[in-house]
Amino acid sequence: MNIIRRKASPHSEGAVLPQGWQWDEGQAVLKKAFLLTFVTVGLWLAASHTLWAQATSSSVAQEIRALTGAKTRIVWVQHTGDGTDIFAHEPHMRLMGLDSDDGLGERELVPGEGSFHKPLITPDGDHVIFTNYVAQGVYIVKWDGTGLRELVGGVAAGVWKDPATNQQWLYAQVGREVGPSSRNNPIWRFRIDKPEIRELVWNKTPVNPEGFQISQDGRQVVSLFPWPHFGVATLPNEAVSELGQGCCASMAADVGDLAFHLLGDHRHLMVYSLKGEERWKVAVNEAPGVDGFEIYHPKWSNQSRYMAMCGPFKGKGGITAEIYLGRFDPTLHAIEEWVRVTTNGKGDFYPDVWVDPGAAQAKVLRFTFNGSPVMEPVGAN
């Protein structure tokens, strides 16, 4: 290697150089140029990544809008660790949201990590309710991230709007039992605007709150009574009928006569007509990127043509789990189209979806009391 030796530079005073070396002004210029180039490239890469992320979020938002044909909001929790806490029991989560129309893309609704469990979008679409599982408290926050406050102690189970009064209610499991025995705690409902107003709705059997979904008229609920016994109950505190066994109960609240649970293979839903004798399996592991692997946390949106889930689950934990939004075909016998909502290589769990009911015009197959199908618009009486 040729070493250029020149007269020492004034910059070399006090500098310690290897024996036989002298300061080279040319090398200093090159070094400065290299550092400037390095910083410039770093800033360019960072800016490019930001622009790519914004473009990706914008593209996903457009795909969601095209899928539903309406303003759509999705909320979920994201694990900040290795993705093994798939039930969001530890304080290592972020509360994430995406609005198809606001141009902000995927973002944190509450800054920083913490205990965020099973988020729920209120029926009006304006707020998100979640459980601080560590503290066993239920909180509410506006979609824009303001107005964070505690509602009640306990674990959030579901939300419902009274069609007669437009009053919104929170259903929560409240009691002294913790851990697995908490399923013995009763379910109460609380007025969201005045949580001091509460009513007991269920303490007849043990129940898991994670799949507690209420019909449009408020008289029926599907859940696990308890896991793995999937059933439908009449509120308040009347009869419960077991329909099958599995996990992740969900109801098509806008039509009130359809429900599903996830089968044990975590690849199929079992769908039930609550007013007829119909039941059928729907594959939900064929979304692009899931590729036949297991999924988890499937849930109907407030509009029964749309559901969300997370997956794939490949072995231990859920670090590979992303959020997906699917649209059923009009018969609800298959998913006809998917949108992959997240692509971040982190564990994303517990999605909930709100589709603007005033704009959605999709039609679904409803069932009469004798099991005969009839096609009607979503939300028809």
Image (cartoon, rainbow, N blue to C red):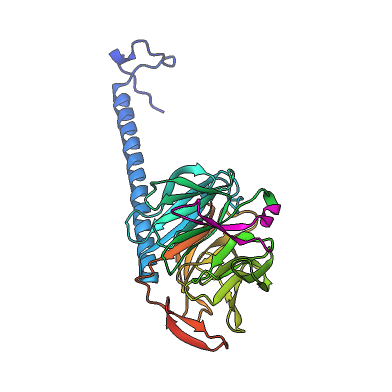
Q: Quadrant of residue 261?
A: bottom right
Res 268 seen here:
no
Q: Is residue 282 above or below residue 248?
A: below
Q: Nearer the viewer, residue 62 or 218?
A: 218
Q: Is residue 164 above or below residue 368?
A: above
The N terminus - image quarter:
top left
Q: Is residue 151 above or below residue 342?
A: above
The residue at the point 55 percent across, 65 percent down is 213
Q: Nearer the viewer, residue 85 or 191?
A: 191
Region in magenta: 181-204
Along the horizontal axis of the image, is 194 left or right of 117?
Answer: left
Q: Quadrant of residue 372?
A: bottom right
Is residue 332 covered in magenta?
A: no
The residue at the point 34 percent across, 23 percent down is 4
Residue pushed farthest top?
14
Along the horizontal axis of the image, is 306 left or right of 22?
Answer: right
The residue at the point 49 percent across, 76 percent down is 255
Could you say where residue 45 lies in the image, as x and y percent from the top left?
A: 36, 44
Q: Nearer the viewer, residue 18 or 183?
A: 183
Could you say where residue 369 lies in the image, as x and y percent from the top left?
A: 56, 85
Q: Is residue 37 above or below residue 47?
A: above
Is residue 200 covered in magenta?
A: yes
The C terminus - image quarter:
bottom left
Q: Nearer the viewer, residue 171 or 81?
A: 171
- The image shows a total of numbered marks equal to 0
Res 20 seen here:
yes
